[in-house]
Image (spheres, coloured by chain):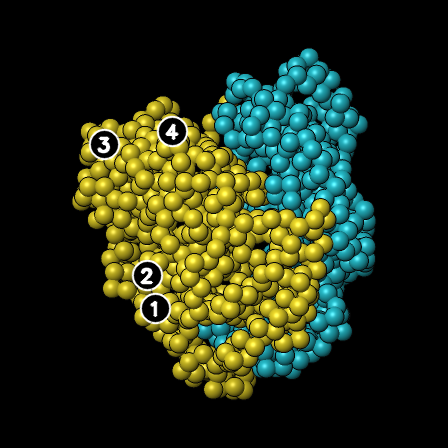
Chain colours: A yellow, B cyan
Amino acid sequence: MKKYRKFGSHILDYSTSLQNRRSFIQNCASVGFVTTLGTPELLTTQKSQFEPNPLVVNQDKIWEICSASIESAKAAGATYADVRMTYTSSRSMSILSFGSEVMGIGLRVLVDGYWGFASSPIWSVDEAARLGQAAVRQAKACCISGPKHVDIAPVKIIESGQWIMPVNDDPFELNPDEIYDYLNSISVALKHWPGVNTAAASVGFRKTDKYFVSTYDQKVFQRTYLSSANILIVYLDKTGRNGHLSIDSFTPAGKGFDYIRNSGMRNELRAGYEELLEDLSLPVKPLEVGRYPILLDSSTVANLLHKTIGPATELDRILGYEANSTGTSFINDPKQILQSYRVASDKVTVTSDRSVEGSAGTVKWDDDGVAPKDVVLIDRGLLKGVQTDSERSGWLNRNLSGYHINSSTGSMVTDNAQTPPNIFSGNLTLSPGEDSSSDEALIKEMGDGVYIKHGSVDVDFQLSSGVVSGNVYEVRNGKRIASLQSAGILFNTLDLWKSALRIGGSDLQRTFGLSASKTNYGAQATTSVTSSPVIFREGTVIDLTRKA
Amino acid sequence: MSTSKLLTESELSEIRDKLVSYSSGVGITRLAISSSWSSELSWARNSPSMSSDRREVSVVVFRNIKNGLGLAHINQIDDASLKNVMRLAEEVALNSGDPKEPDDHRFPIPVVGWDGGASTWDDKIMVRSIEESANLIHSTTVKAWDKGLMSSGYLETKAHNILNFATDEFGREAPDGISYGEMTQIQCSATVRDASRGGSGWAGKSSYRLADVSESAIAEKALDRAVQSINPVKVEPGRYTVVLEPQATADLIDHLILDVTIMGRRYAESSAHHVMGLAVDPSLSRIRSKMGSRIVDSRVTISHSIKDSNLGVLPMAGVRDITLIENGVLKELYTDRGLVLNELNYNKPNLERNSYRMEEGSSTTEEMILSTKRGLFVTRLSGMTLVDTRSLLMSGVTRDGLWLIEEGKIVKAVRNFRFLESPLYALSNIEEIGQAERVFHPRQPSTFMGFTPQMLLSQVIVPSLKVRDFSFTSTIDAI
């Protein structure tokens, strides 16, 4: 049977896996390919031949274009305006490699309390001026019942400046050969492991330059990076045992190529492989539906945080701005912040930041131009904070006197200038509990119950309930004894978090880069979520495939 | 660009000519050059929250040099940028791919055979002003405000045009290698909530034609539904007869139509785990698909005719009429050129697309409710997740309006459920088929789908359905 491949698919056979570029060039040469192509210098390049548009390095011109759009918006009647110009380079390397270079300019204006936005791919003073008028027209069109009061929280410190995310190996400065050869070395290593039938590896890099100017005379330049790798191992041995493993150690992070080419890569792969073998040695059992203690590994807890507490504390969701799109929140009244509203057990403390080095959501200024602050969202189980932008923190000030955070938390995000910014969760961290040497030690602590690894989480549109699915194991007397088929956890979000008994230690903390999407026009953002495994007192284990 | 919302066809052609001249010549080149414009109005808490006018250009170059594959994307159209994007595609092509195994389905270049289809363009969308949109929305939010309800929603008008170009492996223009298409889209959806009394109503519609989408009717329906759904009660999970509104029908069968049949015959015949795949046929030593087998109720027919002016199509060779399911039998699956040439040995592909129509029946929704002893009336389904690929079992939740039917009458609003059901099972348990109508089924433009422009279109027309034994596994608190 011929294996199917499609664009964008990252799965490839060994026989065809990431091949050594040099051998490919030799291949080509041997059939006279180099001469046919007529551009031999292309094949001997030491660095990418791609030359960025000269505009993207002409900062003076960029600031001039930014100012032109702000001035045009002010002249047309905007009381506030901010403009973003972004230049985003992306590369993905696998069987089908991909490169993308996108420039954009987007202007946001406030007129009589209504927001307007206009964007374009063209970087010129004339276009910037057109955007000023277009954005104001959009805003003015909405002002039918007269001006609206918008409580924009006062920006305490307006600072200009520049910030470049610190990375060791800028993937865009490296010779692409280095990256291809490294991927090839991974596949060579995997090939020698018994039973490994297929492996797939791909890497992706993104670099974004963002210029931000607002009517507060703020001028900001930021450069951010996002790097990731996907490695999939498919195992099939002579006895017919089979399984697959997706290495989750290289999810998107605010790092460079060093993130992927780190000394721990081989160990991660080895550990994953051994884990797969161990899983396969367990008997497969049918499931007994019921309520059991649950241990979720760190990746499952990260997904759970990212799908529940993260979005539930985004103030736009709470206030109903997302009702027609991704949905609302189980926190349906912001006043609950002041009312000791319990959303989790007292073991649970969750913070949001946009400052941790190497995290996917880290920036120096958000898309309102505000320097983000670290926020405690859940303090020992009680709701303490929400994630806001300048506009909606103004709403909090007016409607929630007594709330200690009286300005934006800096949660406004857009990853490109062409999409209006929205509130997105920052990097989330679940505070660790007492040390615990390994997941196995926690399994021992739990005694009897169910353990879930590599779980994914689906929630409803109010984030109030959901299902966890993944690799599910029965635990008896502190040991994994069987793999449970088609098992999952059905949960009520608050009940589940309130039953959190034991948070794993900082030694088991891991960080994952996860993406979220919201709004009807599909705004997206990537952040990091850090967590350790958690034991929950009780959860409902169901057969995911059993109908009512 | 600075004055018009889209690039013209001749501007797109000019870009193509330049790109072709910048190519090193050898191997296959495919180009997708497009421009788009959208005007968007979001509202929340009964007031506009964001209004935008966005324009974009996209140039996607695919190069296939000696089995090396490269894809590059840029959104600038000056000469230097066009040179660069071609160079980037060639650079990544030389760095990737597999020199050993020729694999021609990777470049399904167009083929001869376009004889015209219905347009998907409506000038009225291009001239609809933001002021007009805002006025329409204002009049609806005022009504919600008056009733003490919270209205939120989204109204978008947009246009997109695309020039596709392909060469053969010698760099010559392929037969019928050029296609130009243009499309418009309007989408409107509204959610009205009465949070304190647990009511939430939704309505929405999308089309390429302005006249198909009435903002005031959508807002009115969302508002009515919000009022009708207050104070929902819990009923026991279990199997219920359901009356699915057309939107719920589309939500349920979308996965069957889009993810399964669109991946087409190649997938179905490459995996015995595929829902449309059967076991290996020993005489052919390959997997047979279920084509020719009855897979659902014999009243079900799902098709796309390229002359159907309600659905429309972008001009492109290899896009033909298709009847996916006829009288319950899996009749045809989408086929790409590589498959037809290599394995089926005839050059008549039928390329994937995103629009379809399910034939209607003779019942009305009222009649379906009237004939139901005990059941549920479902507005829409949300958060669909595939649980089992072989049976297409899916998990999800009901959203924005669920009512209990008893003795032929809607008696009360009920709490939302999580369900677990397969569209194949549901389509085999049909009791009645209602009137077909256009549903809310918009698509976000994606730069990287430039080579399959039909995927940008998504006109879906399906009927309401009465289905027995629909499986609801648990109640949920979400409203």
Picture layout, residue A470 above or below residue A197 = above
Q: Chain of mark 4?
A: A
Mark nearer the viewer, 3 or 2: 2
What amino acid is labelled 3 in the image? Met
Instruction: Report helix, strand or loop for mark 2.
Output: loop
Which residue bears the numbered disc 2? A357
Is A106 left, or right, of A291 in this rendering?
A: right
> What is the x, y in percent for residue A303?
39, 44
What amino acid is labelled 2 in the image? Glu
* First-in-chain label (3 vs 2): 2
* First-in-chain label (3 vs 4): 3
Q: CA distance from mark 3 to mark 2?
A: 34 Å
Q: CA distance from mark 3 to mark 4?
A: 19 Å
Which residue bears the numbered disc 1? A166
Q: Badge 3: how crowded within 10 Å, few (<14), some, or many (20+)?
A: many
Q: Residue A420 occupies which quadrant of the picture?
A: bottom right
Which residue bears the numbered disc 4? A495
Instruction: Report helix, strand or loop for mark 4.
Output: helix
Circle on res. A270: none
Tag 2 near tag 4, CB within 8 Å: no
Mark nearer the viewer, 3 or 4: 4
Relative to the observer, which residue lies in front, B409 or B226? B226
